[in-house]
Image (cartoon, rainbow, N blue to C red):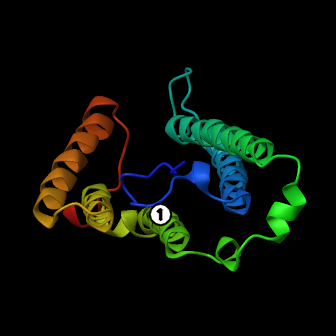
Amino acid sequence: MQPDVDKYQGEASQDSAPIAGRVGDVILSVLCIAGGIAVWCYSSTLPSPPGGAFGPGLFPGILGMLGVIFGILVGVFALFRIIRARLSQGPNVKANLVSSSSEDTTVDSAQVARWLDVIVALSSIAFYLLFAEQLGFIVSVATIHIVLMIKFGHKVLWSVIIGCVSTMFLYWIFDRLLLIQLPDGILG
């Protein structure tokens, strides 16, 4: 029986990967849950305007809760895959794990690439937090969109067009429609 092939990575899918590879999903789940709780706790400390109107903590609170929910989902699915893999290995699990080749215990380039993708995505958040006040919402978010799209394989021209259009759309929604004050930065 041939393993499923991931159409984006050109390799065997996670269902055919060793159990040790799924531990990364569990770690990612825990990090998402912890990060979501931290963001939600921080958002609850932001001031609320009088009269029960929505304050600046609304969207970070929503994002924090979504981080917790998606972290739980990633963890549950990772645990299901681990259980399914152990059940499909049959009764001689220890013998299979001991006799596995050294290829199963080494970190392959696809795993490194996935972790680098996570680091790039988290770095984009750090970039926004560090430079949004100086550069402004439009410049910093457009930069993040363009860089991420190029990093994940889109053409430069389309990345610039879609990055600029999506940034202006987000600016319009948050600044004009929802009346949320965004950093002005160099565009004043």
x and y percentages locating residue 20 in the rendered image:
73, 62
Name the quadrant containing residue 149. Answer: bottom left
Given residues 3 and 65, the one toward you in this image is 3
Return the residue nearer the eye: 119 or 108: 108
Residue carrying label 1: 129
In this rendering, position of residue 143 left or right of residue 109: left
Please name whichever residue, 139 or 96, is drawn nearer the observer in this view of the structure.
Answer: 96
Q: Residue at x 49, y 69 (%)?
A: 110
Categorize mark 1 by other alpha carbons within 10 Å: few (<14), some (14-19), many (20+). few
Q: Where residue 143 appears, x then y in whole percent?
A: 27, 65
Q: Spot the residue most to the front.
A: 1
For residue 23, side relative to residue 54 (left or right): right
- Looking at the rendered image, the quarter that the C terminus falls into is bottom left
Amino acid type at mark 1: Leu
Left or right, 92 with reference to 132 = right
Q: Residue at x 19, y 59 (%)?
A: 159
* Label 1: which secondary element: helix
Q: Residue 15, image x and y in percent?
A: 60, 48
